[in-house]
Amino acid sequence: MTDLERIAPLFDGWEETMIWSCLQGVMGRAEANEDCTAGMIVSQDFTFLSGKPDIGLLERAPGPILVPRSESWEWLIELFFGEKAVKETRYAIKKEPEAFDRKRLEGFVAALPEGYELRLINEELVPVLLAQAWSRDFCAAFDSPADCCARGVGVVALHGGVPVAGAGSYCVSRGGIEIEIDTRADHRQKGLATACGARLILECLDRGLYPSWDAIDLRSVSLAEKLGYRRGEPYTVYWIG
């Protein structure tokens, strides 16, 4: 039995693309305590904690975002990190492959404001996106521009040839991606995130991929619902300062 096979039961039923990706051996890493009663999965900025709370495992959790599966993990995080742990609420979004209305999504794409154009992320765009804080997570999970374009999928809105908004692959798994979406501060409130998100969902559907969404706040929930998703349950995360 491989280490991933030993750890997998600890994460049964946790419907999270980053967890699936790691257990599939696609991205991320997993670690368990000695008797495999507790485990963590690390993917990008997120560390998922499951099983019986274990202080030794928590000491090795890199953060900066810890996602506890139980209240007992929450208690241990608060005890161990104290004021360094900032408790926040995120919102799960239901994974429903049949939920999308293609005509509605195509309408959002067609409503892109004048002066902007949508383009799929290609190898030339990857270094540009990685160089800016607002857009780096569209591509940061990948080993190279070629890897990003081979395994990921993303869309950017260009203004004067410069990326100012986009939706990309924060993570990929077998059969799907985790959507990362953002707009540069000086181009917000113009419908760019809606157009990019709609175009990315359509691209995923055309490729047989499921575009998972996880919401950092209620504004993100609202955009997800506009694009056809339905809200799931809120859950607790900790930012470790």
Image (cartoon, grey):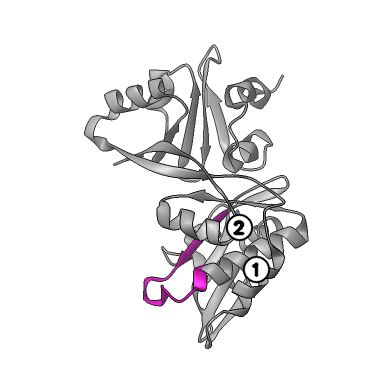
Identify residue type, mark 2.
Answer: Gly
Q: In the image, residue 121 lies at what x, y percent?
A: 62, 69
Q: Can you identify the residue that label 2 sits on? A: 228
Number of numbered discs visible in the structure rendering: 2
- Specify start and end residues of the magenta stretch as a single range: 179-193
Q: Residue at x 43, y 44 (%)?
A: 90
Q: Give the image quarter of residue 2.
A: top right
- Kindly tell me whether residue 63 is visible in this rendering: no
Q: In the image, residue 165 lies at what x, y percent?
A: 49, 71
| Along the line of sight, the residue nearer the viewer: 155 or 111 | 111
Residue 155, above or below 61: below
Residue 53 in the magenta stretch? The answer is no
Identify residue type, mark 1.
Answer: Arg
Residue 190 in the magenta stretch? The answer is yes
Residue 52, above or below 176: above
Q: Is residue 116 left or right of residue 148?
A: left
Q: Can you identify the residue that label 1 sits on? A: 104
Q: Is residue 100 left or right of residue 231?
A: right
| Along the line of sight, the residue nearer the viewer: 106 or 200 | 106
SS for dot 2 = loop
Residue 108, above or below 173: below
Q: Residue at x 68, y 49 (%)?
A: 176
Packing grade of label 2 (10 A; few <14, some 14-19, many >=20) is some
Q: In the image, residue 82 lies at what x, y percent?
A: 24, 29
Q: Give the image quarter of residue 139.
A: bottom right
| Along the line of sight, the residue nearer the viewer: 91 or 121 | 91
Q: Are marks 1 and 2 in contact (CB under 8 Å)?
A: yes
- Mark 1 and mark 2: Cα distance apart in space: 9 Å
Question: In which quadrant will I find the C terminus?
Answer: top left
